[in-house]
Image (cartoon, helix red, strand yellow):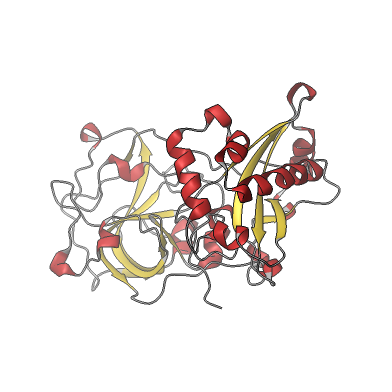
Amino acid sequence: MRSLTILPLSLAAFAATPAAAEDISCSVATAKPTSVAAIIAGEGRAGDCLTVSAIAWKGALYDDVAQIYAEPRPARAPDGRGNRVAYFPPRGADGEPLAPGGALPAEAAEGFARQARHVIVTGKLNFCRMGAVNGGRPPSPYVVDESACHHPGGTMIGAVAVAIDAGPPVERLTAATGKKSARLAPLSADSAWTARFEAAADELLPALASGDPAQWRPLLGGQWLSQPDAQAVTALLTEKGGAFATVLQSDAAVERVILGWSPALLSASDRADIAASPNAEALVCWSAHRDAARLWPIAAFDADNAPGRPYACARITYSMRDGTPTWRAFIEGGDGGLAEPES
């Protein structure tokens, strides 16, 4: 099974193509309406003033929720155009976010809203390319400093206006509502890895349920688990109303699923490589909900153990090097996923 680990973003400095000094006019009134898909497909040139009605999440724009789940691996064309569109709020000469007339909400000014929201973004289209300009700080007031290009895709909109829907955050897709968008799927019963991960999960859950760090810490890295990380795990396991508390303190039967990459995303050669590899990684999730099968996460970013999730998850890495099986679990928390559906 292919690793679920998210690759770190490139730290190479890119420089955004600056807009011409004499062409800095861009407003809601003058912008051309477009879509994320159209931009990725090639619409627009550097410096064009565009308006996009989309979902903003973690600094990128998407036409709809399905596009978030279907986002392909990062890639850049020779001209710097990527297969995702990042957005960044307007900034002044000092590099600080601007909030004209107080109309720009704080979460937009930060540029990387953690909760997905429906937005209308107006701004100038630019593309990130290798190499720095002016010591790494592009001169255009509509393009932020070089950190704006520290993202996998090469396409970005330097926003001059951001309108955010005041409604609820964008909800995640579930096993019941997003089958066609699923990036994760239960491991096949005939996979050589299934029994190994099942055995690891059978050992892990009782250790977590014990509440005793002496029992679960060795399974989460032992001496390699830092004290801050151990404290974070303790907080997740004991959080009142948290994802793990719902599972560990429930009197109902607990269901389990072990998830890997969806077979639909794997070629025959991918599957052969996974079967032959001495290493693998999977997500194991537990739920005390009676309709757990309809609620499992379909993407790794929703297995975040956020409060209110109807499941709790751990990531397990497994190795069979030199014929000796070893594994380690990771209990991770955060607010990286989309909002939980209300019904």
> Residue at left 58%, top 36%?
214
In the rendered image, which quarter contains the N terminus? top right
> In screen coordinates, is 48 left or right of 223?
left
Q: Position of residue 337 (x, y in %)?
A: 49, 58
Residue 206 vertical position relative to residue 335 in the rendered view, above or below:
above
Between residue 154 and residue 12, name the one nearer to us. 12
Measuring 22% from the left and 39% from the top, which residue is drawn there? Answer: 137
Q: Is residue 323 above or below residue 297?
A: above
Residue found farthest to the top: 322
221 in relation to 289, above or below? above
Q: Position of residue 144 (x, y in %)?
A: 25, 48
Tally of numbered discs: 0
Residue 119: quadrant of the picture: bottom left
| Relative image position of residue 249 (x, y in whole percent) | 60, 61
Depth check, front residue: 213 or 327? 213
Residue 250 is drawn in which quadrant? bottom right
* Residue 13 picture location, percent across and down: 34, 34
Looking at the rendered image, the quarter that the C terminus falls into is bottom right
Pick the front one: 293 or 170? 293
Please indicate whether residue 208 sits to the left or right of residue 236 in the image.
Answer: right
**Horizontal relation, residue 343 to residue 146: left or right:** right
- Which residue is found at the position 35% from the left and 43% from the top? 149
Camera sees residue 16: no
Can residue 316 be seen in the rendering of this structure? Answer: yes
